[in-house]
Image: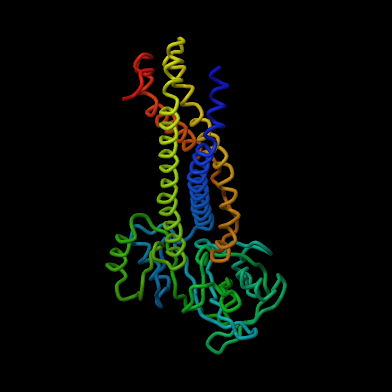
Amino acid sequence: MLEKKMFRDIKDYRMQFISIFLMAFIGVFVFTGMYVETNSFETTINDYYNETNLADGWIYSNYLVDDALHQVYLLGATTQMERQLVVDSNAKLDNRPEVILHFVENNTISKFYPLEGSEVNTDDAGGVWLDKSFADAWNLKVGDEISFESNGIEIKKQIRGIGYSPEYVYDSPAGSTVPNHTAFGFAYLSHKAFPSSNITYNVLDVKFEGTPEMYAKLLDYRFNGYYTAFVSKSNQFSVDVVAESIAQQNAMSTVFPPIFIILSMMMLSTTMKRIISNQRTQIGVLKANGFSNNAISMHYVFPGFLFVTFSSILATFVGPIVFHMLANPSRTAYFKFPYWNSIGLTNSVSLIILMAILSLLVSHYSIRSIVNESSSVILKPKV
């Protein structure tokens, strides 16, 4: 009897229940979509940084001889270090695009991540490992030769590999906020590929223990006057831009979805109160015919619970898929990383449970006052 009445109530108030379904769906859809997408992006970037051993800091100096490295080691906090010579160059292509060349000592910190071709070989004097985005923009392949000009010196190498670098997840030409891969790129080379036997390193990649602030103080104490700048990981241009993007997405995912969730609960409360007000006499008749308070409560609570829970489950599966389809093209246009690690839907189950509990509480709160009254009081006409 109550089952038939419940379906009749749903049919009579279908527009209200559809609105509840949509509001709950939108709230959970936006939350799970943004939450899974943002946290998957953050997880992917952190995994990529860890896999490539991104430096904790960069020391810029023209005095990176063996004695200087010994002084940096004596700081006590340094756990790893690697020298690089980083120079600006122009590729000998149309419009002479800018390419930053990294002559690496051993490729153990901030490692180049090859997608095509071979790993970086620090004994290879004739090869270069090129930025994939730049290579794609210029239709360059593994095995092609490319020439760079730096400080009047021509450097001609064969492309051994194409890939990404953790230092260039976000990269753009100077003065531009939009990446232009036909105008800007980077390349990794062995220190043996430098055109002179006397290579003067100018960047020291370091891994260290403790905070960047403490490391900077130690560095200033022991190495003062022998370095021009120290840049911590959080202040590195690409890392900072990526972190800011993730922070903005996290902020949005916590602001907008609760609005729709609150609206859905308010609509559920209003709908249940309207149904109960219109069916006051029917509730009194049910109580007079021996139906328990719990049975009547469940009868009125279940429709809201059903619609909210089903919409939450549906949104939990649809949200991450749709958001990834919408967000991924624009994200990969700005940020370059080799793979995607999705966190899955495990953390979204708690939201489904929360929505189900909220719907039960809201519906129960709407019905509890009249259910606790006696049938004679309920059936008495309101004055």
Query: Could you tell me which quadrant the N terminus lies in?
Result: top right
Could you say which quadrant of the image residue 111 lies in? bottom right
Image coordinates of residue 291 in percent, x first then y, are 46, 13
Q: How is the image coloured?
A: rainbow
Q: Nearer the viewer, residue 217 or 106?
A: 217
Image coordinates of residue 41 in percent, x first then y, are 52, 54
71 to 279, vertically: above or below: below
* Residue 38 visible in the shown view: yes
> In the image, what residue occupies the spot 43% across and 11% down?
288
Q: Nearer the viewer, residue 174 or 268?
A: 268
Q: Nearer the viewer, residue 41 or 296?
A: 296
> In the image, what residue occupies the spot 55% across and 35% down?
310
* Residue 347 visible in the shown view: no
Does 232 sit left or right of 299 as displayed? left
Looking at the image, the residue that sits furthest to the top is: 290
Does 230 sit left or right of 186 as displayed? left
> In the image, what residue occupies the spot 66% across and 71% down?
136
Q: Nearer the viewer, residue 83 or 28?
A: 28
Image coordinates of residue 117 in percent, x first then y, are 69, 64
115 to 369, vertically: above or below: below
Query: Could you tell me which quadrant the C terminus lies in?
Result: top left
Image coordinates of residue 265 in percent, x first then y, are 42, 38
